[in-house]
Image (cartoon, coloured by chain):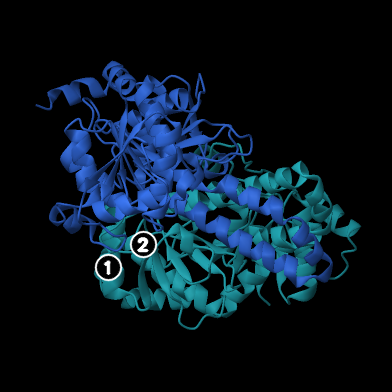
Chain colours: A cyan, B blue
Amino acid sequence: MLRIAVDAMGGDRAPVSELDGALRAARDLGVRIALVGPSEPIREGLRARGWRNEPIDIVHASEVIGMGDDVTRAVRRKKDSTIRVGIQLVKEGKADGFVSAGNTGAVVMTTALFLGTLPGVERPALTMVLPTVNGRGTVLLDVGANADCKPFFLEQFAVMGALYSQKILGHRHPRIGLLSIGEEESKGNELIRETHQLLKANVPHFIGNVEGKDLYTGEVDVVVSDGFTGNVVLKTSEGLIESITKMLRQEMMRRLDTQAGAILVRPAFQAFKKRLDYAEFGGAPLLGAKNTVIVCHGRSNAKAIYNAIRVAKEFHERKVNHLIETELAALPGSKPKTKAVP
Amino acid sequence: MLRIAVDAMGGDRAPVSELDGALRAARDLGVRIALVGPSEPIREGLRARGWRNEPIDIVHASEVIGMGDDVTRAVRRKKDSTIRVGIQLVKEGKADGFVSAGNTGAVVMTTALFLGTLPGVERPALTMVLPTVNGRGTVLLDVGANADCKPFFLEQFAVMGALYSQKILGHRHPRIGLLSIGEEESKGNELIRETHQLLKANVPHFIGNVEGKDLYTGEVDVVVSDGFTGNVVLKTSEGLIESITKMLRQEMMRRLDTQAGAILVRPAFQAFKKRLDYAEFGGAPLLGAKNTVIVCHGRSNAKAIYNAIRVAKEFHERKVNHLIETELAALPGSKPKTKAVP
């Protein structure tokens, strides 16, 4: 039975979301869960939730890396953190994947230091699925693992993102775009212009540069970006959604005739916000990491944790990592380079 | 009387928006307008709109640089383009400023090649005012003039953006933030980490790194960014607003009980979209250019053109350029560097 380690102390609502999500996953998904965190409270929490014989193990970890922690320091010093212990389980083959709603930077760094990347992968990429008007979803990567990138990192992101779109979202021939500031290949900064040439030469279904306005339409399936720009895009979107909702409410409350309407449209508003809520989408896999590592939003609820465990399972079963290895090895540019590393 | 040159053939609705906007500005703002474009159609268009003795001159230009044109080629070859002729008027002192809703890249490049920058300015920055929840507006720069930047470009952007916020938006002590992917000064890419140190040392009211989520709240008055990231932010925002509106409509139409509400909230929706419409904000000045150059959105309506002319006037009257020169000269880092240029 597949075994997924879950950081019990990761999110803002930990361990509530984690325990609820893990219990549901253990019941429904046919996976064995290893809940990582302080064992006594977790055991009590599970019992209070009616835990009987669902396949859940508790793996003790005494420390937590918080959102405010200095990541570099915390990753090195907190040797018994839930993140470190969870990653260690994966490394030792005691778990097939790790799900955490904790400090993203800490998960990325712990993975890099203690788990490593797949053979041939230069850098793992944090990968999100954005909601789109047409419902297809757009894969955006990297959204924050690598602030400074080189063109061949982005080339690998393109290959990994395409596999994710195929195997997890079910798009057979994903269209791949490069995030830039104009459609022409001459547009963009130095990194993007060089990357464009690489993708054009080596990546099938590369449709060229795309712009920020194309991210939410669903006309492109995979958008490749450096981790700085990708993260800015993500946080701008989150902030804009929040601000837009506030502004729209202000406008509706300003006028008497629309106040009544505002009450009537409330259910639509809820559905709409849910549709945009990244937490619903099953977390952000760290593509290219050795084994399966999935980072969830700090705001994750039980459903988000459950979805992330489901994605971890699908990710493993559909052999995404194996395919990543194979396809990267077939990439002309990166092959000799990565082979040269001892 | 102040004289503003207006590209009559710039926007998607040219020359309609331009003629309407210019005529209104000539009537209300106490400025003289030079409309640049094919003289006969412009003359007829003005007459059809009831032009009598409003202070408008027509300056003939036979070519137009379109949105689809290769910018580099068009700027060099189309010597009689409305953009080239308009910038030339400014250069020769026949106009005090230039307003165009045409190809942004072409305006930026024409300005760089034929007008130049203020003494001490390394690169001009395209500057937008973003709408915010609290109504203060946030100045974002650069939004696209410089895809590749160096830290001292961004330092100058901070100074120029602060002056714009003070003199045009009326914020006495604008809070200045640096767009990054985390608040800590260790966060960001190489460019941003280096820039952070410069701003911390030399720029008053620097509040540190800000994130995409802070752009639309109004908690920060000036956000400094390289032109690549700034442009991606802008286009992501535009696209997200459009997609969100569609998704919200889909949700409202999906349910019978909210359809009635949807009709009731329509006026609020209109007001809300207008509030977010960048076209309303009077265009994007190219801060640091010699003299006043303002780029408007291609979608600009007459009001947007009018507002851009108004901003050009205020920009000139409030001596923003003179202040930019003075303050940049006082900046410790950039002074020797720029002085060294012959």
For the residues labelled 2 and 1, the Cα–Cα distance comes to 9 Å
Q: Nearer the viewer, residue B8 or B333?
A: B8
Q: Residue at x 78, y 75 (%)?
A: A28
Task: Name the image quarter holding residue B315.
Answer: top left
Task: Name the image quarter holding residue B224.
Answer: top left
- Amino acid under disc 1: Leu
Residue A220 left/right relative to B94: right
Return the chain for callout 1: A
Mark yes or no: residue B188 visible.
no
Indicate the position of residue A237 as horizontal and vertical percent values. Answer: 56, 52
- Rendered position, B75 above or below A28: above
Q: Secondary structure at mark 1?
A: helix
- Amino acid under disc 2: Leu
Q: Earlier in the sequence, mark 2 or mark 1?
A: 2
Q: Residue at x 37, y 73 (%)?
A: A207
Question: Label 1 crowding class (10 Å Cα cut-off): few <14, some 14-19, many 20+?
Answer: some
Question: Label 2 crowding class (10 Å Cα cut-off): few <14, some 14-19, many 20+?
Answer: many
Most extreme residue toward the bottom, as rendered?
A: A172
Residue B252 left/right relative to A218: right
Q: Nearer the viewer, residue A79 or B279?
A: B279
Residue at image mark 1: A198
Indicate the position of residue A226 as horizontal and vertical percent values. Answer: 40, 55
Residue at image mark 2: A154
Return the chain for callout 2: A
- Rendered position, B141 above or below A269: above
Q: Secondary structure at mark 2?
A: helix
The C terminus of chain A sits in image quarter: bottom left
Q: Residue at x 52, y 23 (%)?
A: B171
